[in-house]
Image (cartoon, coloured by chain):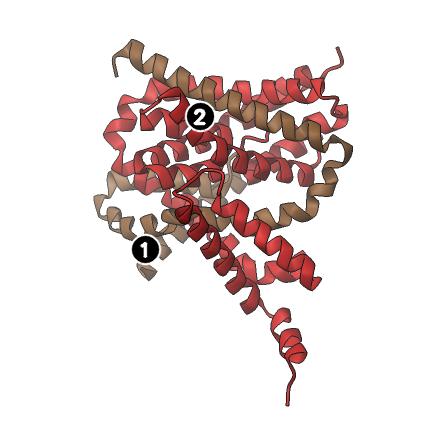
Chain colours: A red, B brown
Amino acid sequence: MTDVAEIWIYLSQGPLIWLTLTLVAYGIGDWAFRASGRRPLVNPVLLAVAILAVVLTATGTAYETYFEGAQFVHFMLGPATVALAVPLHANLALIRRSLLPMLAALAVGAGTAMVSAVAIARMAGVAPETLLSLVPKSVTAPVAIGITEALGGQPALTAVLVIVTGVTGAIIGTPIFNALGITDYRARGFAMGVASHGIGTARAFQVNETAGAFAGIGMGLNALLTALIAPLLAPLLVAPY
Amino acid sequence: MIAHLTVLLTFQLLGEAISRGAGLPLPGPVLGMALLFVSMLIVPRLSAIATTAQGLLAHLSLLFVPAGVGVVGQLDRLGADGPGLALAIAGSTAIAIVAGVYTFLAVAKVLGR
């Protein structure tokens, strides 16, 4: 007879269990989000990540082993990003009318994200060599990593800061807009996408389809803008006083 | 659904190839999104992928979970700078969201849109 430990050893080495657990953890996170009356603080991504981190730690599983299963979910980020073209197309007339507000909000949102992040970090006494890795944190991960490499920052650190920024934006965005009484979903979505990339965009889609479409544009445009201006802006931001 | 996925993957592949080939500062999928958007304007039949696209986008959050789990293991990289960086991210994200949303609304109002 095979005992439970042997079954576990067999399963934990293959991708099936980690792929399944990723979906189960997200299912629990999504259930809790709905059960809480869609409270922003009960973020499904954050909950799923916390559950999986506990499971990996408790079972002594390496991230590489986990990722062999989770990579199938991770891979779908690419096609899902391409799929953002569909809500863009569906909202074409609205987007055409909103071109100038978007470009203005892009410039201001991207600029304040970089400048305020470095300014606050400096005031909080963050080490100067860490500041460079913070500059592209509002940009979607693959671009942010490319930017940080070009600036001479640390890619792994930037990856962490990018994800934390996305989750932060996803949690604080909706409460901020509601507190300020902002009901224009174009503006809400676009600001979310610029400030907190794909995770903010995912959150915007949960709230409203128009918000999601505008968040997708904000994310894409900010990737382009920050890639172009960060190399010019970063040396000024992190320069000694 | 397979045909729809084929469209999405083809545009991602095109985006990756062009972005890498031309050395553009855009990730392949983002360029793929732009290419698909333009193609949908020219070939309206491509809109048939809407059902699959909406299915994927409805669960966009799920797709960030594996990367998020990776971040948990890297949190010690933040070291002594952790609290300062957390403050910088929380503060700057709030500032950028508020600045962005009000800029959008102000320009839209001036233009009467």
Residue at label 1? B4
Q: Secondary structure at mark 1?
A: helix
Q: What is the x, y in percent for residue B31? A: 44, 39
Q: Residues within 10 Å of mark 2 (few under 14, many from 20)?
A: some
The type of residue carrying mark 2 is Ile
Q: Quadrant of residue A182?
A: top left
Count of labels in the image: 2
Q: Residues within 10 Å of mark 1 (few under 14, many from 20)?
A: some
Q: Residue at x 28, y 11 (%)?
A: B111
Q: Amino acid at mark 1?
A: His
* Residue at 59% across, 50% down: A50
* Structural distance between the alpha carbons of marks 2 and 1: 37 Å
Q: Residue furthest front?
A: A36
Residue at 29% across, 27% down: A95
Q: Residue at label 2?
A: A176
Observer-nearest of B66 and A222: B66
